[in-house]
Amino acid sequence: MKTNYKQRLPHIQPVGAIFFVTFSLYGCVPKTKLQELKEKYTAEIVKANQITERHQRNLDVFNIRKRYLSEYDQMLHSIVNGPDFLKDDNLKNLIRDEFFKYDGELYELLSFCIMSNHVHILIGTSIQMSEIIDNEDLEMKYVSLDRIMKKIKGPTAMYCNKALNRTGQFWERESFDIYIRNDKMMDNVISYILQNPVKAGLVKEWDTYPYNYIKS
């Protein structure tokens, strides 16, 4: 089963893991800044992959990914100009509905936050494993994170463009994702997601923001 894939960036997707994913509107981050981040990120990953000791190599790669996801998010919050289509509550509702469409089928929807130019989502994919009995079953039935994201980003792009009466690319092609290693990390990620509108000054308390979600 393929657990690594590469578009412009390398991704690591363990089967059945919990994933924290960030994706943004196309063009909201200047291309030069995004390219600089990607080049720096990729160079560090290549260097880390040269470490011969497997545990240290995996740990270094993981920490690099975590750091750059945080740096990318800070970049998104610093944007003053650029597309902010998701200020429209109708679009937020379209995206929220699509998140719940696959909840209980392809993943367990644990948390999300929809901001004006980007989205955070936390999903657990182990729910798919209950009906998988062997490796052949895994290859045939398991829907990996990259395919899940296509199922989310494709339709939401189409629906949002239609609502806005526009055409063209809606989301950045790349998503930034990282898998959750333990309960402490998951708690930190959930807090990070839900505090987004508070940090942006939209609300004083995370639970008053209508496009925050945490599974009860």
Image (spheres, rainbow, N blue to C red):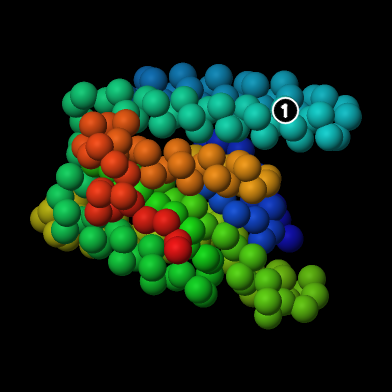
Q: Position of residue 131 (x, y in %)?
A: 68, 80
- On screen, residue 4 versus residue 57, left or right, reads left
Q: Work out whether 114 lies above or below 97.
A: above
Residue 40 is at least partly visible in this image: yes
The residue under the point 49% across, 52% down is 122
On the image, the x and y values in percent for residue 59 come to 74, 32
* Residue type at tag 1: Asp
Furthest toward the front, the residue is 205
Residue under the image location 56 percent in, 36 percent down: 9
Q: Measuring 37% from the left and 39% from the top, which residue is drawn there?
A: 195
How many marks can you see?
1
The answer to whether one can see residue 177 in this image is no
- Residue 195 vs residue 42: left or right? left
State the image quarter where residue 94 is shown. bottom left
The crowd level at tag 1 (other Cα within 10 Å; few <14, some 14-19, many 20+) is some
Q: Secondary structure at mark 1?
A: helix
Outermost residue to the left: 165
Read off the residue under disc 1.
60
- Counting from the top left corner in percent of width and height, residue 17 is at 65, 56
Give the quarter of the figure containing the C terminus: bottom left
Q: Percent position (x, y) of residue 186?
A: 58, 46
Q: Nearer the viewer, residue 140 or 79?
A: 79
State whether residue 148 is above or below residue 36: below
Q: Quadrant of residue 140?
A: bottom right
Residue drawn at (17%, 54%) of the image = 89
Q: Which is more toward the observer, 14 or 113?
A: 113
Q: Quadrant of the N terminus?
A: bottom right
